[in-house]
Image (cartoon, rainbow, N blue to C red):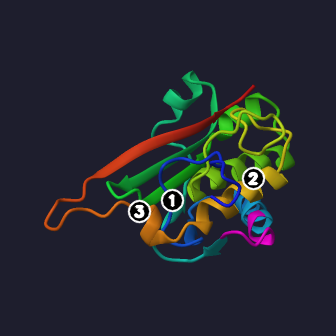
């Protein structure tokens, strides 16, 4: 790391600082997620490209497991699939509409939560600072300089130095991790 200090990141990331995104949500949430994507893209440290077909990141409504998410008081979830080399294979993101409504989230606050989930999709972990979009229960904070710095540092490491090489002939297992933001 350039600063000699590790940024607040998960142990996985994409090969490069760009990923494709497929939006499978209705018109309102398409606007919310598009605003969040545009906000990250404007920082010029990672490039999200919205596509019509299959993508590395899929944004979906939280339907199949919404009861579980409500019980856990979650408003946003990033489900990250990665292989044993630490490469992200796919990411599924969703916002829990019923929780956002119940807790009176405005559109701007929903965009903040979407920015948070996109942070996980890039490889960022929760930041202990309440002045980061990656704080565990973000609502009022959008992308901050510390968040940009962490993405920049994460992707400043060349891929061949960052990823663990699998031994020749070894099976590459896929793991799934859930990273969430609660509504506090």
- Which residue is found at the position 48% from the left and 49% from the top? 11
* Marks 3, 1: nearer the viewer: 3
Which quarter of the rendering shows the C terminus? top right
Quadrant housing residue 167? bottom left
Residue numbers of the magenta segment:
40-46
The secondary element bearing badge 2 is classed as: helix
When asked about the image quadrant of residue 96, the answer is top right
Residue at x-position 71% and y-position 59% = 33
175 w.r.t. 57: above or below? above
**For mark 2, what is the residue?**
147
Neighbor class of circle 1 (other Cα within 10 Å; few <14, some 14-19, many 20+) is: many
The crowd level at tag 2 (other Cα within 10 Å; few <14, some 14-19, many 20+) is many
Residue 170 in magenta stretch: no
Report the mark closest to the observer, 2 or 3.
Answer: 3
Check residue 13 in the rendering and tell me which mark sits there, or answer none. Answer: 1
Mark found first going from the N terminus, 3 or 1: 1
Note whether 168 is above or below 111 in the view shown.
below
User: Where is mark 3, residue-wise?
Assistant: 163
């Amino acid at each position: 790391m350039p600063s000699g200090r590790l940024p607040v990141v998960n142990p996985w990331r994409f090969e490069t600082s760009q990923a494709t995104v497929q939006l499978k949500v209705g018109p309102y949430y398409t606007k919310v997620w598009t605003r969040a994507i545009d906000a990250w893209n404007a920082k010029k440290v990672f490039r999200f490209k919205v596509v019509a077909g299959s993508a590395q990141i899929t944004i979906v409504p939280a339907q199949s497991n919404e009861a579980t998410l409500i019980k856990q008081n979650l408003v946003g979830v990033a489900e990250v699939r990665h292989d044993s080399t630490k490469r992200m294979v796919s990411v599924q993101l969703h916002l829990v509409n019923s929780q956002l409504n119940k807790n009176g989230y405005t559109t701007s606050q929903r965009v903040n939560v979407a920015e948070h989930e996109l942070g996980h999709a890039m490889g960022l972990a929760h930041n202990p600072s309440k002045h980061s979009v990656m704080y565990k229960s973000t609502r009022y904070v959008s992308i901050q300089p510390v968040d940009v710095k962490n993405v920049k540092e994460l992707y400043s490491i060349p891929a061949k130095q960052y990823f663990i090489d699998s031994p020749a002939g070894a099976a590459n297992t896929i793991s799934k991790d859930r990273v969430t933001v609660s509504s506090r």
